[in-house]
Amino acid sequence: MKKKISLLGATGSIGVQTLDILKRNPEVFELVSFSAGRNIQQVEEIVQTFQPKLVSVILKEDAEKLQVAFPNTKFVFGAEGLKAVASHEDAEVLVNAVIGSVGLEPTLEAIRRGMTIAIANKETLVAAGEIVMAEAKKYNAPILPVDSEHSALFQSLNGENPKEISKLILTASGGSFRHLTRDDLADVTVEQALAHPNWSMGNKLTIDSATMMNKGLEVIEAHHLFNMPYDQIDVLLHKESIIHSMVEFHDTSVMAQLGSPDMRVPIQYALTYPNRIPMQNANRLRLEEIAQLHFEKMDFDRFKALALAYAAGRAGGTMPTAMNAANEVAVGLFMAGKIPFLQIDELVEKVMDQHEIITKPTLEAILAVDKETRILVEAMVK
């Protein structure tokens, strides 16, 4: 039987790589629904290739035009369209590959259907991790990590006793500016920030990697996925991105997952878990060719965004929600040329300093904080 997949964010970096896996393994997977943004030409190509039952786009007029062109597929749009795709009745697995907190409500819809969630959308767990994990437990919906770091932790923990963990160690490449001091960052450009040395990712993720906020979001995500206190989650600078993360146990043993930097590997593992299938057209890891691996202690003064994320996670409640929303808007402003690179961190810190934490928020409270924070950051810049 083919495993039936719903995909949020089909035209983004993770979405495109997910589709590559599905296309190479047609006997294993079937794409039944997907969502996309404004790249309608790409949407048309995906529909022609996979013949899904349901597709969601952002704009109503795009959905109407596509419906005429592809009468055998149903087209919907907007926030409700995202929810419909995420919780499609025929789907078994939801791959959440959208960027930002827009992925939160569709994920909850899928969880309440008891679907398996392959999550690449960090912001869902950052903004509302306690609610998401509680709902997943209630509806017996497995949450499988797609991020390379969390997939590495997940694989390293297979068959282990969680009570015997000493700490989780997330590795970080250091991003586009790992060779620069903080003073050097004042005048860096968007193009420079998008030139990641190891990974091929979407623009927002690449900027977050340059600030190290991406790693901060991953720390919060790891806290929720593995029920681990922040004091037992470390970050280690590892420029080669060969060791994707590690787990240290009480007896000092360290388990690690290694591989070439290829996001298709953790995506495919989440789709096939608990089994593995051959990875087509992939580079195998040759340690004799790499010869050396390098590691450095994380500098929290240099990478201020990571320190802010740890602080937000420890504060809890709605603080991570506010931090995440502020960062999303600030990154967008930097990419639009409206603020310098270092102001991303500054805006996030200002929001956190002003935020009044709701300790046990409802979903409605989280969505309200998210919305209010976005308005606040825009006002700060204006």
Image (cartoon, grey):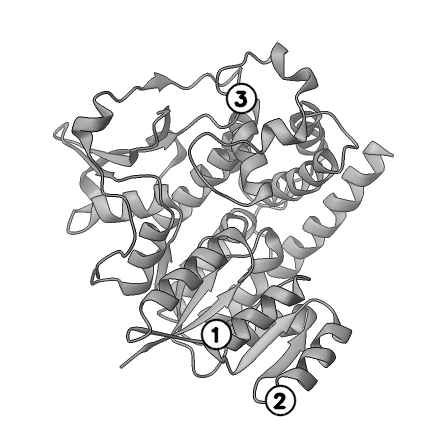
Residue 227 visible (yes or no):
no
Query: Which amino acid, mark 1?
Result: Thr
**Residue at point 77%, 38% (across, down):** 377
Question: What is the x, y in percent for residue 59?
Answer: 74, 69
Picture quadrant of residue 228: top left
Whichever of callouts 2 and 1 sits on the residue coming sooner in the sequence is 1
Rate crowding at label 3 as few (under 14), some (14 to 19) or many (20 or more) other CA atoms within 10 Å: many
For residue 234, above or below residue 54? above
Outermost residue toward the right in this view: 382
For residue 257, above or below residue 269? above
Question: What is the x, y in percent for residue 266?
Answer: 33, 51
* Front in this rendered view, residue 207 or 111: 207
For the C terminus, the quadrant is: top right
Query: Which amino acid, mark 3?
Result: Phe
Residue 17 visible (yes or no):
yes
Which residue is tagged 1? 49
**Residue at point 55%, 11% (across, down):** 181
For the N terminus, the quadrant is: bottom left
Outermost residue toward the bottom in this view: 72
Kindly indicate whether the residue at mark 1 contacts the one at mark 3 (C-beta within 8 angstroms): no
Which residue is tagged 3? 177
Q: State the mark number for residue 71.
A: 2
Secondary structure category for the residue under label 2: loop
Rate crowding at label 2 as few (under 14), some (14 to 19) or many (20 or more) other CA atoms within 10 Å: few
